[in-house]
Image (cartoon, rainbow, N blue to C red):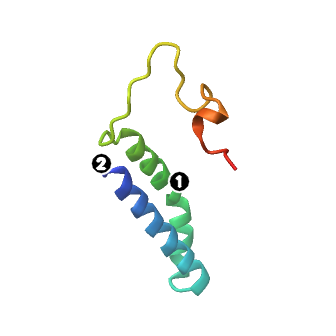
């Protein structure tokens, strides 16, 4: 499998090509096929992202949640004016 960054790049290129084909009318016969295949590419991209182990995340300690639900606004530091 490709890395997460490469799979995102491939899907972005796929989307740009798809939009260009729709707007220009070039090879318009391919557009329905690209539309039908796109969910499979999206699932492939998500699988690549979830299986990518190149970035190490810390293990959660007991009674910790993943995300920001266990932090207050002051601890995050994003809500200061």
State the image coordinates of residue 47 (x, y, percent, origin top left). 41, 43
In this view, the mark in front (2 or 1)? 2
Q: Which residue is mark 2?
A: 1
Q: Nearer the viewer, residue 3 or 26?
A: 3
Examine the image and state in which quarter residue 5 appears.
bottom left
Name the element at disc 1: helix
Q: Nearer the viewer, residue 49 or 17?
A: 49
Mark 2 / mark 1, whichever is N-terminal: 2
Name the element at disc 2: loop
State the image coordinates of residue 13 (x, y, percent, origin top left). 44, 69
State the image coordinates of residue 38 (x, y, percent, origin top left). 51, 59
Q: In this picture, is 9 found above or below 40?
A: below
Q: Residue furthest top?
A: 62
Q: Quick one: label 2, few (<14), some, or many (20+) residues within 10 Å? A: few
Q: In this picture, is 53 found above or below 72?
A: below
* Residue at x 29%, y 42% (from the top left corner): 54
Q: In this picture, is 74 found above or below 79?
A: above
Q: Quick one: label 1, few (<14), some, or many (20+) residues within 10 Å? A: few
* Residue at x 35%, y 58% (from the top left corner): 6
Examine the image and state in which quarter residue 51 appears.
top left
Number of on-image labels: 2
* Residue at x 45%, y 55% (from the top left corner): 41
Q: Residue furthest right?
A: 81
Q: In this picture, is 39 found above or below 18?
A: above
Q: Which mark is residue 39?
A: 1
């Amino acid at each position: 499998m490709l890395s997460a960054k490469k799979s995102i790049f491939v899907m972005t290129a796929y989307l740009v090509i798809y939009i260009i084909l729709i707007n220009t009318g070039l090879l318009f016969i391919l557009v329905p096929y690209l539309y039908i295949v796109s969910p499979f590419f999206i699932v492939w991209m998500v699988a690549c992202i979830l299986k990518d182990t190149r970035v190490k995340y810390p293990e959660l300690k007991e009674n910790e949640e993943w995300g920001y639900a266990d932090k207050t606004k002051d601890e995050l530091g994003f809500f200061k004016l």
